[in-house]
Image (spheres, grey):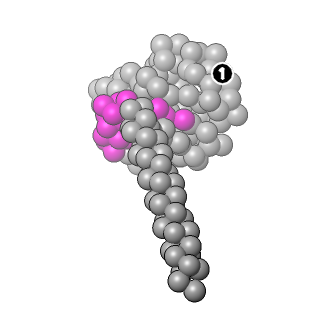
Amino acid sequence: MTETKSRLGAALRGLVTGLTAVAAVAATVPATEAASSSARPASYVIGNDRGGYLHDRLLELTNLRSQGTRVEIRGKVCYSTCTMYLGLPHTCVDPNTVFGFHGPSRSGRRLEQSQFDYFSRVMADYYPVPLQKWFMEKGRNRISGVHKIRGSEIIRMGVAAC
């Protein structure tokens, strides 16, 4: 009986030692993965986004730019101020996403011309150059509804595909 207890004790000690070694190795894997993932910015995925207030979007864009966050526009629609993500350096778009553009307004009402011009330029500065030109000449003049452009066309203007 003593010999059996002794063998059982040795086997349990071996099992505990083995499990401890496995646990120690396993514990380092997530730490290593966390260290490598913290070295690169996380992706921020945009689903269906119909826009919002310009001021709020500008704050969000400033934060994403300062962190070097990759932005992936993958939803079915990206309208209004959502389109301003296109100006961030690490942005990609799904070719099937539909982008909707319109000029700045105050709750759907036209702004004074000086304000309209100023906020149009603020928005346009977040677009690739070919899109800036189109927006300032045509896109901004629609206040109700949106001009729709597919992601595939945005990609042809120089924005990366996801």
Where is residue 80? Give x, y as percent: 49, 38
Where is residue 108? Give x, y as percent: 45, 45
Residue 119 in view of the camera? no
Disc 1 crowd, CA 10 A, few/some/many (<14, 14-19, 20+): some
Residue 110 quadrant: top left
Quarter of the picture holding the N terminus: bottom right
Q: Residue furthest bottom?
A: 1
Residue 69 inside the magenta-drawn segment: yes
Where is residue 144? Give x, y as percent: 53, 41
Residue 105 inside the magenta-drawn segment: no
Residue 33 in view of the camera? yes
Q: Which residue lies at the image location 53% right of the left edge and 13% below the top edge?
A: 130
- In magenta, the rendered stretch is 54-72
Q: Which residue lies at the image location 56% right of the left edge and 15% below the top edge?
A: 158
Q: Tag count in the figure?
A: 1
* Residue type at the position of mark 1: Glu
Q: Which residue lies at the image location 56% right of the left edge and 36% below the top edge?
A: 73
Mainly helix, strand or loop, the magenta region? helix
Does residue 62 appear to the left or right of 86 in the view shown? left
Q: Which residue lies at the image location 68% right of the left edge and 24% below the top edge?
A: 152
Front in this rendered view, residue 9 or 76: 9
* Residue 108 to residue 101: above or below: below
The residue that disc 1 covers is 153
The local secondary structure at tag 1 comes to helix
* Residue 35 to residue 150: above or below: below
Residue 157 quadrant: top right
Where is residue 120? Give x, y as percent: 39, 27
